[in-house]
Image: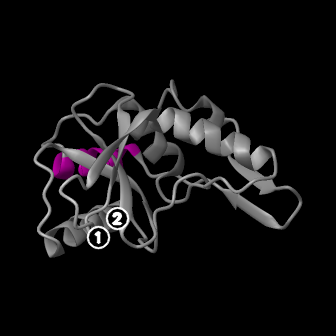
């Protein structure tokens, strides 16, 4: 796959956090697996380019995105959707969750907003009707690039 957006992730496949012993590397999934996910979560339409790159480079393990306890991207998507159902929440547009944290929140993109869409944060357990928030102009590319720079400067990527 030709990497256009996540070149910084491609050129930093592993990082150590300030000689503290925190060391992590990325591990991706195959293009065949990505196509399978596209079939299931985007009606066979291609994912945004930046999401495909993230999955290809780091769909199994990524030091700047938290996939939770889920072992596969499929499990991650199922977990997010189950949490939403438990709380009677729905997202009517095609979306893909790529980061979960705190056991009750996740980051996602809408799959119909171009090749480098903005990120949204969802709080399905919130009692508030505004349980989805747009994260300004933050994209997967900017989130990943910023996380890599944080690790390089000795900070936690999150």
* Point 17% across, 56% down: residue: 129
Tell me where residue 119 appears, x and y as whole percent. Answer: 38, 40
Tell me where residue 151 appears, x and y as whole percent. Answer: 74, 49
Tell me where residue 68 appears, x and y as whole percent. Answer: 46, 69
Tell me where residue 2 appears, x and y as whole percent. Answer: 49, 26
Magenta residues, dominant SS class? helix
Say the numbered circle drawn on residue 79.
1
* Point 46% across, 34% down: residue: 138
Q: Magenta region: which residues?
A: 31-41
Dot 2: what SS?
helix
Pointer 1 local density, CA inside 10 Å: few below 14, some 14–19, many at least 20: some
Residue at label 2? 76
Seen from the viewer's position, the closer of residues 2 and 20 is: 20
**Left or right of residue 135, residue 25 in this image:** right
Question: Are the residues at dot 2 and dot 1 in contact (C-beta closer than 8 Å)?
Answer: yes
Pointer 2 local density, CA inside 10 Å: few below 14, some 14–19, many at least 20: many
**Left or right of residue 124, residue 94 in this image:** left
Asked if residue 83 lies in the magenta stretch, the reply is no
Q: Quadrant of the C terminus?
A: bottom right
Seen from the viewer's position, the closer of residues 154 and 125 is: 125
Residue 42 position (above or below residue 87): above
């Amino acid at each position: 796959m030709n990497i256009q957006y996540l070149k910084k992730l491609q050129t930093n496949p592993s990082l150590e956090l300030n000689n503290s012993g925190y060391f992590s590397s990325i591990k991706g999934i195959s293009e065949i697996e990505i196509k399978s996910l596209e079939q299931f979560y985007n009606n066979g339409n291609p994912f945004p380019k930046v999401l495909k790159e993230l999955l290809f480079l780091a769909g199994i393990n990524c030091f700047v995105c938290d996939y939770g306890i889920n072992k596969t991207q499929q499990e991650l998507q199922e977990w997010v959707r189950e949490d939403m159902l438990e709380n009677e929440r729905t997202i009517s547009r095609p979306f893909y969750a790529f980061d979960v944290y705190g056991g009750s929140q996740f980051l996602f993109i809408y799959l119909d907003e171009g090749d480098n869409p903005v990120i949204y944060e969802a709080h399905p357990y919130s009692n508030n009707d505004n349980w989805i928030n747009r994260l300004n102009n933050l994209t997967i590319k900017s989130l990943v690039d910023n996380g890599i720079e944080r690790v390089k400067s000795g900070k936690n990527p999150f």
